[in-house]
Structures are given as structure tokens and as C-alpha cells.
Image (cartoon, rainbow, N blue to C red):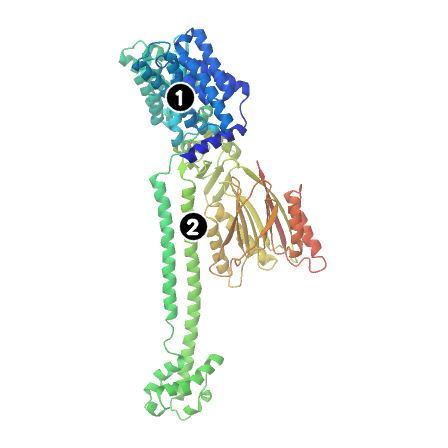
């Protein structure tokens, strides 16, 4: 709990540094709230006045006190609210004293304690001027508790609302209490038969019913009805009518605003007739009609703004999906281990006897003179047959003349030679088959590793984006249908940090521009989205939207061919639609057309696999297998990949046989080198990676091996220079490399430089 209280205090200090509304507007609003709270009598007192004074900043609290006093003067009832007149200045003084002594803002619990203590103290002082009874003391304590409760939940609500009014489970209770007290305050304002609090409560019921359906209409309708009854007992008969109207509007929400508004008013009229038109329902019908009219006039995007998203906690189905993927990855890993162990066992099951022993067993054992050939069978194999096996291994065959002299009188010489040559041929075939099987086994293991990486990536993705908003997802699907898409799928979801994303899948073409769609989707979700990322395979299109990021990346690229007309280097810059940008460079083996084919294949396929959402590890392993099996000739390419998250500034660098990368961070330049082989050389590739935290102004330079080491000091110097753009940096590095290599094979290798500078928006 101490950590949570400290979090509130730190948030209050941070809020003071943020851009605030104009001071006069804040003071005027505080005075208005104080004026309204003074007219909200709960019993014989107005404890909300003290609560507002406790929550508001120092000068705003003074303005709230002045507004309350103005109400007391106009109503000519100063003597009835002595408790408030004493407690409000006491709260202001206590808050100022705590801030001066401790030098930090109060937590919600501290604000609540000061409000309740000041009100109870003021009530006890005021009680000395009249007859003190146990009932009076209990009433003072009860109203003090109301003041403290209102102050606590209002302070929490302001804390949660500092970055927007998105509704979450944690803040729902605070918002509900503040809403109830606000409606109570507004119920004290009437214009003839029209009551401002009832109009506001009915409008909120309509908005939430339209936004959240039956659940939203019923919950807010019940809360509004409770507030009406707390403000005035004469409004209690309309409570059931308010709840029923909210429920029916929720049922008709999908029919549009006009139909929903008509159902809202019609339900109220029908329920009033059923009740026999009690006296207060005659006032309810004009109020609900006004609320319905405002509901129809106000744009839908404005109504959604305070309640932009309803991201539910991950369902058991989502968690089960993630667990199933994780379990499947573990199963694949276990299968791979078992497969490897079994293959090792079979590899150890080599030939029990050598060729010489097998020849002896097949030929000599059938000879009637074998008992007189050599001192023993072991002596015969070691002395007479081993020399023939050595000749066989060197030449690949053996003749009768090359047999040992001890076999000159042997009648089976011809059979011995034929058996030696035949067994050797079979042994070569077996070894060749074993090599092929070994290669296939390595490729199979790499495929299993790629499958395991893919499943783990999907599992982590389901954990990273656990929450979705079903209602907003429905709005996006409806919008796609209006754009000419049949049966689209769309999901509005958030990550663990609360950032909102949209992912759509559809077949066909949109009949509107992507910019228009992005603007419309932004209005629906009340978010500013970056330009969407579009990727299509066959007839299916994937459309991804993410919020505007915290950072933007400035890129620069420069390249020059080596001795061939075609560069063997290839590169790409792309985004994945989830706030990540990628820079990818590949250097093919050698230079010219062949190297270009290898590097372009690597870059093209890797970028498509990553954008399709399969993850970096799976992309690397798939490319490795493709290069291994592309042709019988040796074929490989380097991979130099940087993934940069524009929300957090975290960079992930993956290098396979690539040249070193330069990183400027915190005013120093460091390098990252590769410890892995290029893709396409070995069946099982080892993926080395490095994670780095970048911030505003940091820079990354990626190069191919055509940039010689003599240029590295100039690269570091250039990265530390001020006022050099990313493009200028890339071009100068290429110039350094050309000048450094001048006169000594300056065009032997292709040269490519990619520069990325991070800027905070």
C-alpha cells in the first residue's frame, strides 16, 4: 500500500509539470462547484462543500469556498451551515500547512482524512451553539464520513483521469461515486419544471446504454436513479422508470441514435402510464425528452470521448490459447530432443566388424583348409587380410597380386578379392546414404526449431496484447462493410501499456483511401493513428493501425557498387503496424548478379515473413533453410537486422555474419559485432542478438563489410558531430570509404550504409 500511495504522490507532482487549463477557468469552475455543492443538502448540512475544497488545489479551494458562501448568502441560510463555514477554511489551511512542511502533495487517503476530520471538528464546534444530543453527534460523524468518502474518491478519479477518461476496472468505483455526487449537486439546479441533475443523469444513462448496451444502461440508470433519490425524496418514484428506460435503450442501441432515443422516451412514457402518472413523472417526461434531444444532436465521437474504450481483461479462451501455444512449443522442443537422441543411437550402431573380419567370415569360414591357414583366425585376419583392407581404403579396390604373400597358395584368392571389393562398394553406398540422412536430419531439426520459435512468438504475442474492445471492433467491422468489404474481421485491442491497435483481415479492395479509413477509425476509437501498414498474400489483406508513436526515426541510406555492375548488397526499411520499424541489410556471397540474387531473396522473404507476423527467429530459420536447399552450389548471405520500437525506444539487433554496427547512446559510441555464421552455411543457425535502450537523439549506423576498418574512427567522429542529418551521415561514410581505399582496390566490394536517428515527437 505504501508503494501505491507513493505512486499517487508522484503522479500529483508530475501533473503539476503538465500543461494545465487557464488559471481563471479553473478558479471559475471551482467556484461554480462550490456554489452547486452548497445547494446539495444531505440532511441538515452540505458535506460536499468541504470535500470539494479538500480536493481542489490551494487557490481553487479558496474559490470553491467563495462560491459556497455566495450560495449561502443568496439563500440567506448562513446560520444553518456553520459547520461548512468552519470546516472549509480549516481544510484550506491544513492542506497549505502539509504542503509547506512536507514539500509534497497529499495522497487520496490524506485528502480524505483532512476533509473528514475538518468537517467533524467544525460540526462539534458548531454544536456548542445549540443543544448537543447523541443524534446530533452521530449526524455530524455521518456527514463527516460522507465528506471524507467524497474527497477520497474524487482525488482517485482525478488521478485516473490525468491521461484521459478511459474506463478500467480499477477506476470504475471512483468514477461511479464522483458521478453520483455530481448528479446530486446538479439536482439542486432547476429551470421551471426542468431539473439540470435529472437531465444530466438521463443523458448519461442514454450515452452509456448506447455505448455498452443493456449492461451499461442498467448500471448507469440505477446509479442515476439512486442519485435522484439521494438529492430529493420526491424524485424516488421515477427511479424504476429511469432504470427501465436505460435497459430498453441498450436493447435498441444497434438500431441507431434516432430509434434509440425514441425507445428511450417511449419507455418513460409507457412506464409513467403504468404507474398511473405520479406527480413527479410529469416532470420526468420533459427532462427525458430534453436528454434524448441532446443525445441525438451531440456527435457520436464526442459522446465516446470520455469512454473511448472498454478493454476487457483477457478471457479464459485467450489465456487458454496462449497456454496451448506455449505447450505446443514445449512439445516440439521435446520431440526435437528425442529425435536427436534416437539419431545418435542409430549413428553409434556402426559396423560391428571391419571389412577384413567380414571377408574372413564369408570366405575363410567356408574353406576346408582354414584350420591350416595362419596360427589362428585372429592371426589370419591381422596378418593376411588387414593389409588388403588398407590397400582398399587407399585405392578403392584390390587385386589378387596385391594380396599378402601368405595367401599365394590359397585356392580362394579370387573369392577374397571379389568379396573385399563388393563390401567396400556397399560401405561407400552406406556412408553416402548416411551423409544424405544426416543432412536431412539437420534440416528437419532446423524446421522443428523454426516451428518452436513460431509457436513461442505467437504465445508471447497473445500475452503482450491481452485485452480487446468487442464493441469498438464491431464498429470497425461495420465501417469496413460500408467500404465495400464482405465479411471482414477486425479487432481493436491494447497492449500491456494501454496503447490501442487495430488489426483487420479482408478480401477485395476498399472503396476509399486508406487515409480516410484511418481518420474514420480514429474518430471511432477516439485515438490518433499512424498511417496503416498493408500487406497482402494471395487474396487476403492484413491492415494494421497503431497509435501515433512517441518517437520517429530519421533514416539515411547510401550505397556504391563494387567491381561488378550489380551490387551484391540489398536492404529494406519497413514497419509491422505495431509501432516497430525494421532496418535490414544483407550481403550476398561475393558480388555481382549471383550475390544480388542471394541478398535480395534474403531481404525480400525476411521482410514479408516478419510483416506477416511470424517473428524474427522463424524468419531467420526459414531463410536459412531456403538458402541451403536453393541449389547444390554453396549459397549464403549475411543478415543485419535492427528492430526499433517507437513507443519505448528499445532496439533489438540481430546479426548473422554481418559487419559491426555503431550505436551512439548517452553521448558515446559503441559497437555490436556478430558471433554467428551467415544464413545458408550450416543447417542449424545460431541467432545472436543484442537489446539496447535508445532515447531522443541517439543514432545507429549499419554497414556492410565493404567499409574498411580505417574508416571506423571517422564514423565515430561523424556520429558525435552536431547538426548532421542521417542522409548526410550515410553519404559521408561512403565518401570516407572511397577515399580511404583510393589506389588499392577501391571498388573490390560493394558498400552499403544505413543510418537511423531517433527523435522524440
Q: Position of residue 742 (x, y in %)?
A: 71, 57
Q: Is residue 363 left or right of residue 645?
A: left
Residue bearing the label numbered 1: 117
**Tag 2 or tag 1, which sits nearer the N-term?**
1
The picture places residue 94, in percent across and down from the top left corner, at: 46, 22
Q: Secondary structure at mark 2?
A: helix
Image x and y of residue 390, in percent: 46, 82
Q: Residues within 10 Å of mark 2 (few under 14, many from 20)?
A: many
Relative to residue 175, is residue 527 drawn left or right?
Answer: right
Picture quadrant of residue 125: top left
Tell me if residue 368 can be seen: yes
According to the picture, the residue beneath numbered tag 2 turns out to be 454
Picture layout, residue 60 above or below residue 407: above
Quadrant of the rendered structure where residue 273 is?
top left
Closer to the observer: label 1 or label 2?
Answer: 1
- For the C terminus, the quadrant is top right
Instruction: Using the numbered discs, state the Cα–Cα distance from disc 1 to disc 2 in whole angstroms.
Output: 60 Å
**Residue 63 spot, x, y in % from top left:** 50, 16
Secondary structure of the residue carrying numbered label 1? helix
Tell which of 521 and 232 is nearer to you: 232
In what quadrant of the picture does the N terminus appear? top left
Quick check: 678 left or right of 91?
right
Amino acid at each position: 500500500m505504501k508503494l501505491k500511495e507513493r505512486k499517487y504522490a508522484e503522479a500529483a507532482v508530475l501533473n503539476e509539470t503538465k500543461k494545465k487549463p487557464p488559471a481563471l477557468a479553473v478558479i471559475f469552475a471551482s467556484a461554480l462547484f462550490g456554489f452547486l455543492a452548497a445547494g446539495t443538502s444531505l440532511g441538515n448540512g452540505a458535506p460536499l462543500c468541504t470535500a470539494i475544497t479538500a480536493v481542489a488545489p490551494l487557490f481553487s479551494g479558496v474559490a470553491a469556498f467563495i462560491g459556497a458562501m455566495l450560495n449561502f448568502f443568496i439563500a440567506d441560510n448562513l446560520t444553518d451551515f456553520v459547520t461548512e463555514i468552519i470546516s472549509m477554511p480549516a481544510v484550506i489551511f491544513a492542506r497549505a500547512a502539509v504542503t509547506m512542511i512536507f514539500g509534497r502533495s497529499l495522497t487520496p487517503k490524506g485528502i480524505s482524512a483532512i476533509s473528514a476530520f475538518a468537517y467533524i471538528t467544525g460540526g462539534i464546534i458548531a454544536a456548542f451553539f445549540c443543544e448537543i444530543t447523541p443524534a446530533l453527534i452521530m449526524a455530524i460523524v455521518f456527514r463527516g464520513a460522507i465528506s471524507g468518502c467524497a474527497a477520497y474518491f474524487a482525488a482517485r478519479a482525478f488521478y485516473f483521469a490525468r491521461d484521459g477518461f478511459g474506463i478500467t476496472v480499477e477506476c470504475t468505483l471512483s468514477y461511479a461515486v464522483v458521478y453520483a455526487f455530481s448528479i446530486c449537486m446538479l439536482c439542486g439546479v432547476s429551470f421551471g419544471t426542468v431539473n439540470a441533475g435529472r437531465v444530466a443523469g438521463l443523458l448519461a444513462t442514454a450515452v452509456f446504454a448506447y455505448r455498452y448496451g443493456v449492461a451499461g444502461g442498467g448500471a448507469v440508470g440505477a446509479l442515476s436513479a439512486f442519485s435522484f433519490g439521494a438529492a430529493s425524496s420526491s424524485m424516488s418514484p421515477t427511479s424504476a422508470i429511469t432504470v427501465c428506460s436505460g435497459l430498453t435503450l441498450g436493447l435498441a442501441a444497434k438500431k441507431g441514435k434516432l430509434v434509440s432515443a425514441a425507445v428511450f422516451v417511449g419507455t418513460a412514457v409507457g412506464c409513467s402510464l403504468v404507474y398511473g402518472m405520479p406527480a413527479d413523472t410529469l416532470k420526468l417526461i420533459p427532462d427525458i425528452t430534453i436528454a434524448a434531444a441532446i443525445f441525438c444532436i451531440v456527435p457520436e465521437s464526442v459522446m465516446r470521448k470520455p469512454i473511448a474504450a472498454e478493454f476487457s481483461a483477457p478471457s479464459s479462451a485467450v489465456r487458454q490459447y496462449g497456454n496451448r501455444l506455449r505447450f505446443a512449443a514445449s512439445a516440439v522442443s521435446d520431440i526435437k530432443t528425442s529425435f536427436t537422441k534416437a539419431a545418435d543411437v542409430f549413428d553409434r550402431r556402426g559396423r560391428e566388424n571391419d571389412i577384413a573380419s567380414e571377408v574372413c567370415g564369408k570366405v575363410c569360414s567356408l574353406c576346408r583348409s582354414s584350420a591350416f591357414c595362419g596360427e589362428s583366425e585372429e592371426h589370419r585376419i591381422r596378418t593376411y587380410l588387414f593389409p588388403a583392407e588398407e590397400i582398399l581404403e587407399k585405392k578403392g579396390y584390390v587385386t589378387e597380386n596385391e594380396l599378402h604373400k601368405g595367401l599365394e597358395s590359397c585356392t580362394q584368392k579370387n573369392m577374397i578379392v571379389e568379396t573385399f571389393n563388393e563390401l567396400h562398394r556397399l560401405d561407400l553406398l552406406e556412408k553416402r546414404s548416411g551423409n544424405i540422412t544426416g543432412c536431412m536430419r539437420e534440416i528437419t531439426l532446423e524446421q522443428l526449431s523454426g516451428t518452436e520459435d513460431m509457436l513461442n512468438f505467437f504465445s508471447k504475442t497473445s500475452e503482450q496484447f491481452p485485452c480487446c474492445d468487442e464493441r469498438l471492433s464491431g464498429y470497425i467491422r461495420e465501417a469496413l462493410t460500408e467500404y465495400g468489404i464482405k465479411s471482414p474481421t477486425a479487432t481493436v485491442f491494447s497492449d500491456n501499456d494501454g496503447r490501442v491497435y487495430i488489426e483487420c483481415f479482408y478480401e477485395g479492395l476498399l472503396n476509399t483511401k486508406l487515409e480516410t479509413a484511418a481518420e474514420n477509425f480514429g474518430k471511432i476509437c477516439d485515438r490518433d493513428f499512424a498511417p496503416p501498414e498493408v500487406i497482402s498474400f494471395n487474396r487476403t489483406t492484413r491492415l494494421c493501425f497503431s497509435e501515433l508513436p512517441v518517437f520517429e526515426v530519421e533514416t539515411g541510406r547510401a550505397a556504391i557498387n563494387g567491381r561488378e555492375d550489380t551490387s551484391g548488397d540489398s536492404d529494406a526499411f519497413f514497419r509491422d503496424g505495431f509501432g516497430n520499424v525494421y532496418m535490414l541489410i544483407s550481403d550476398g556471397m561475393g558480388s555481382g548478379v549471383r550475390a544480388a540474387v542471394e541478398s535480395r531473396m534474403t531481404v525480400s522473404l525476411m521482410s514479408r515473413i516478419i510483416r506477416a507476423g511470424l517473428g524474427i527467429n522463424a524468419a531467420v530459420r526459414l531463410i536459412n533453410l531456403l538458402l541451403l536447399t536453393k541449389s547444390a552450389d554453396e549459397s549464403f548471405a549475411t543478415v543485419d537486422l535492427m528492430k526499433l520500437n517507437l513507443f519505448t525506444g528499445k532496439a533489438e539487433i540481430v546479426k548473422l555474419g554481418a559487419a559491426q554496427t555503431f550505436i551512439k547512446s548517452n553521448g558515446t559510441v559503441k559497437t555490436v559485432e556478430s558471433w554467428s555464421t551467415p544464413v545458408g552455411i550450416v543447417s542449424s543457425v545460431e541467432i545472436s542478438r543484442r537489446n539496447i535502450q535508445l532515447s531522443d537523439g541517439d543514432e545507429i549506423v549499419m554497414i556492410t563489410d565493404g567499409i574498411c576498418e580505417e574508416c571506423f574512427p571517422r564514423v565515430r567522429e561523424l556520429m558525435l558531430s552536431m547538426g548532421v542529418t542521417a542522409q548526410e551521415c550515410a553519404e559521408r561514410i561512403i565518401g570516407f570509404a572511397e577515399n580511404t581505399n583510393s589506389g588499392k582496390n577501391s571498388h573490390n566490394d560493394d558498400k552499403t550504409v544505413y543510418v537511423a536517428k531517433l527523435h522524440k515527437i
